[in-house]
Each structure stands twice: as structure tokens, then as C-alpha cells.
Image: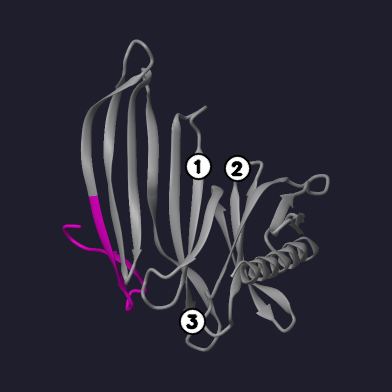
Amino acid sequence: MKKGLLVVAASIGLAAGFVLGAMRAASLLSSRSLEVRATLAGEGPAASPAALPAGGSQVKSYRVATGDLIPGDGDEIAVGLTLLSGDGEVAVFRRQGSGWMQAARIDGLAAIDGLEVRSASGTGRELFIYDDHDELTGAFYRRRGLTILKWRAGAHGGGAFVPVWSGALYEEAYSLDPPMAERLVTAVDITAGGGELVLRGARTRSLRESGGTYRDVEEIPLSERWRWDERQFRFVAVAGG
């Protein structure tokens, strides 16, 4: 079993390394030339971001996920990059002959916190993109969001990834006047599968005490349920949660 897992890990590492190298050569992920190297080390793939050429940005970190996102083409590779600017971008690559081609690019994201290939709709698999927007040292605000993308085939061939759900899993905000006197935290857990998304959590309001700690003064339970609607091709809210 261990040997089989190592073979799979090595294959993923080599494929990711190939794609990341191709990204730099073809500038596929953005208008800037990206350089990220992936190598194998020890018992599994190891990756290290490298600086971009002069005049470009730098890659702070990246995430890689593999899975069958486009029906009929085998596994695809999703690569999420976080730049030092805090911006995030994701590209999905599919096989073309003996190489890879870009199937989609998603920008306008915050720092990429995670990528997953999962089945939530009950009809194929989706790409879960987690991003983290952190301004606690400036605007006193932080948000961890989730965007779910699903491949939608075109009427005459081809297709595209479309967002089928997005929302915040965690939000932390502080009052500006007086500064940081009040804190509001919204945190939910999400379960996904069988054509449903279920969110459970709470919104908590806290007041800052003289010692600098926060005392909870109000907690509101949160419960939401979303079901997959094939006709609308997205998750729709269910009344009453």
C-alpha cells in the first residue's frame, strides 16, 4: 500500500512540476511571467516558489489539487498561486496529447488558502477554492471565503468553469470608532455531498474590556441549507435552512 501511494505522489509531483514549468514558459496564469519549481524530495513531491524576473511579482506560496473536473478527460490539475501582494489566482490544466493545456483561469481572489476536488452536487466533481483576505493590521477585518466551481459543457462542444456557490466561512471585524472596542465574528462549518451544502455556526458579538480581552455579549446561531439545482446549474438556498 505504501509503495502504491508513493508512486501516486511521485506522479502528481512530476505532473505538477511540468505544468508549473509550462506556466512560466507560456505566461499562462497571468500577464506576468511566473516561475515556480516543483521537485521530488524524500518520499513525496516537494515544491518551492521562486522569485519572478525583475519587474514582476513574486510567488509567496501555491497549492495543487488533482481530480476529474472535466468529464471524459481523466484527471485535471488545479494550481492556485498567492503573490506577495496578497492576490490569488487559480488555473486548471487538462491533458492534451502528451502535454497539458490551460482549461481555465480564475483571478480576483485573495490569498489561496486551499484547493480541493470534491463531489458536492452529486453529478460529477467540483473545485473548492478557499481564499483568505486579512486586513487585521489595517482595516481590522479578515475573511476566509469559499468559491465552488463546476465545469459546464457547452451546447456545441467546449465548456467553461462557472461559480455554483460562494460565501464566507469566517469573518472577523472590529469597530473603527472607537477603535477595536467591539468585535464581530461569524464562523460556520460546511458539509457538502449528495447534492446539498449545509452550513452551521454562529455570529458572536464581543466587547473589549479594560485589560484588552474580549467578552462575548451576544451569540446568534446560524443555519443554512443549499440544494443543487441542475436547471439553474447552481446551489440554491432552501427556506428555513
- Secondary element under disc 1, as helix, strand or loop, is strand
Looking at numbered disc 2 in the image, what kind of residue is underneath it? Gly
Q: Mark 1 and mark 3 in contact? Answer it, CB < 8 Å.
A: no
Q: Residue at the location (46% across, 73% down)?
A: 125
Q: Nearer the viewer, residue 181 or 199?
A: 199
Q: Mark 2 and mark 3 in contact? Answer it, CB < 8 Å.
A: no
Is residue 238 within the magenta segment?
yes
Give me the C-alpha separation between circle 1 and circle 3: 31 Å
Please give the residue where the numbered disc 2 appears in the rendered image. Answer: 86
Q: Which residues are magenta?
A: 223-241
Residue 153 is labelled as 3
Q: Residue furthest right?
A: 54
Instruction: Return the x and y of residue 221 as percentages of the image width and height.
Output: 21, 43
Would residue 88 be found to the left or right of residue 164 on screen?
right
Mark 2 / mark 3, whichever is N-terminal = 2
Q: Residue at the location (50% across, 49% down)?
A: 131
Residue 21 image-quadrant placement: bottom right
Would residue 130 be found to the left or right of residue 42 on screen?
left
Residue 200 is labelled as none
Instruction: Return the x and y of residue 226 as percentages of the image width and height.
Output: 28, 63
Looking at numbered disc 3 in the image, what kind of residue is underneath it? Ala
Please give the residue where the numbered disc 1 appears in the rendered image. Answer: 133
Q: Mark 2 and mark 1 in contact? Answer it, CB < 8 Å.
A: yes
